[in-house]
Image (cartoon, helix red, strand yellow):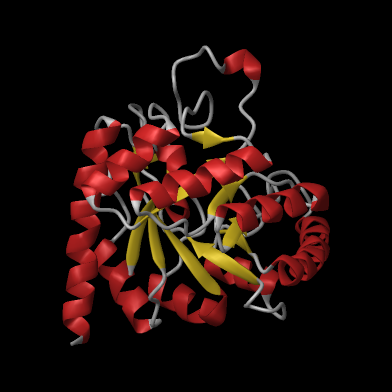
Amino acid sequence: MKIGVFTVGLPDLTPEEAVRELADAGYDGVEWRVARVPEEIRGEKPSFWGNNLCTLEPVVEEAERARSLAEGAGLEIPGLGTYIDVGDLKATEEAMRFAKSAGAPQIRVGRPDGIGRSFGEMFEKSRAFLEEVEGLAGGYGVKALIEIHHGTIYPSASLAHRLVDGLDPERVGVIFDPGNMVFEGFEDYRIGLDLLGPYLAHVHLKNAAYDRPEDGGVWRARWAPLEDGVVDFDLLFEGLQAAGYDGWLVIEDFSAARPSREALRHNLEFVRRFSAGSLARGE
């Protein structure tokens, strides 16, 4: 399995700095964050979802920049972290054109809000959207992925599978994200990975933990370092091995426990220990 980093986790590095650091650390690839950063926040302190310096604008010139930077550093582009609303086919097509120019085989598509909405209504809307996206994916040769994510109508592998079931797994797939499943949607990794079958297209790696309120009550999840949280990486890699997964592992560390450059090296060493152990167990 190859290991990369989603640049949303490198908010204080420019794209040029990011590819240099990734190559020096020994990563295989870079998953670019592609989004528009509002002008009014560009002067703010760098942050994951705010003024993220490691973000590329969704325009042709930036697609060419993405390819050039990756190739210059000897890195592959396993995919693009795009931000597309359910039903926005124009943005989907623009993202697929970007991916073709950048040399990326897949993009992430719309995340339907699952809070305070009718599940049936959002499911039908999302399914209709994906059926149209499936056609675009075939035309552009770019796969469309939905990401298991808390706060959506598919926070678990089983609900993600329900949404994509029956679509062409060569065109539409699922990002398995055990870190998001700490917040909502946890299922045994092996069961979830087995259920997804051919729809398992990509894996994001991060971690989260729970904080107990001082006076008791409902515990709240927060992002945590890879090595110190709820995600059981031993079980995760056993599940990936059992599923025959040999795709990308892409790290997105939101803990801010270490400076970006230090975190890159620490996290790569951490993941390599598990991926090497998984290979050893399979021999």
188 lies above or below 213: below
Q: Tell me the quarter of the picture where residue 135 sits.
A: bottom right
Q: Eyeballing the image, is 72 above or below 164? A: above
The image quarter containing residue 233 is: bottom left
Asked if residue 2 shows in the view, the reply is yes
- Residue 30 relative to residue 147: left or right: left
Q: Residue at x 76, y 63 (%)?
A: 133
Residue at image position (69%, 79%) is 168
> For the N terminus, which image quadrant?
bottom left
Q: Is residue 158 above or below residue 146?
A: below
Q: Position of residue 75 (x, y in %)?
A: 37, 54
Answer whether residue 227 is visible to the viewer in this image. Answer: no
Counting labels gives: 0
| Horizontal relation, residue 66 to residue 19: left or right | right
Q: Position of residue 272 (x, y in %)?
A: 21, 61
- Residue at 48%, 73% (x, y): give it: 192
The part of the image, by quadrant, that contains residue 220 is: top left
Q: Nearer the viewer, residue 6 or 196?
A: 6
In which quadrant is the C terminus drawn? bottom left
Q: Position of residue 109 (x, y in %)?
A: 66, 54
Front residue of 207 and 136: 136
On the image, the x and y values in percent for residue 197 come to 52, 81
